[in-house]
Amino acid sequence: RGSGTGNYGQAVPLAGGVLLDLSELVGFEEVAPGVVLAWAGQNMGEIEAGMRPRGYELRFFPSTIAKASIGGFVAGGSTGVGGVNYGTLTEPGNVTALRVVTAEASPRVLELRSQDDLLAVTHAYGTTGVITAVELPLAPATQWSEYVYSFSDLEGAIRCGFALAESPGISVRNV
C-alpha cells in the first residue's frame, strides 16, 4: 500500500488479504542527470522539493502530492498534474524502471526496464508484485504560477482550458 491517498478503493480484498505498509521504505537519489531513483514509500512532495535545487522537477504527480508515495502513485495512479504534457504513467518513458518483489512461494526481486514488463506492474494496484523502488525521468525545473478562473458556463471553461493547453506560447503543467 502506498500512503492511502487513492480515492478509488484500489485492490481491496473482499475477505482476508494482506496489507503491506511500505511507508518507511524511503529515500531517493539522482542516478543520472534528470533521472531519480526513489524507494516506494518516499513522499512525492519531498522528491519534488529535493530535485528543484538540482534544476529538476517531477514530470507529473497526483493532486495529493503532499501525502502520496511514489510507489503508491505508480501502483494505483494514472496521471495527474503535468499530464497535459506527459500523458499517463503507462505511456513509454514515463516510468523507466521498477524494482518489484514477486508474490511466489520463493519470491524474486526483479529489475524491470522493458515497456512490456513495466506495463504489467504500473497501475496494477500491486496485484502483479510489490513495487519497492521506482526510477523516473524528470523535467527541467520551471517557476510556475497558479491561477484560478471562474466561468459562467461549462463550455466557456472547456474552450479556455483547451486554448491554454494548446497554446505554443504558454508553458503549462496543469489545466
Image (cartoon, rainbow, N blue to C red):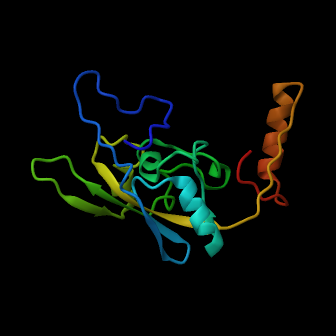
Q: How many marks?
A: 0
In front of the other: 16 or 33? 16
- Does 151 sit left or right of 54 as displayed? right
Task: Tell me if residue 55 can be seen.
Answer: no
Q: Position of residue 52 (x, y in %)?
A: 64, 67
Name the quarter where the N terminus is drawn. Answer: top left
Tell me which residue sits at (86%, 37%) in the image: 149
Tell me which residue sits at (62%, 64%) in the image: 57
Q: Is residue 114 above or below residue 2?
A: below
Q: Position of residue 35 (x, y in %)?
A: 51, 70
The picture quadrant where one finds residue 98 is bottom left
- Does 124 sit left or right of 48 as displayed? left
The picture quadrant where one finds residue 12 is top left
- Does 46 sit left or right of 25 as displayed? right
Tell me which residue sits at (61%, 62%) in the image: 49
Residue farthest along the front direction in this orientation:
24
Residue farthest along the top direction in this orientation:
14
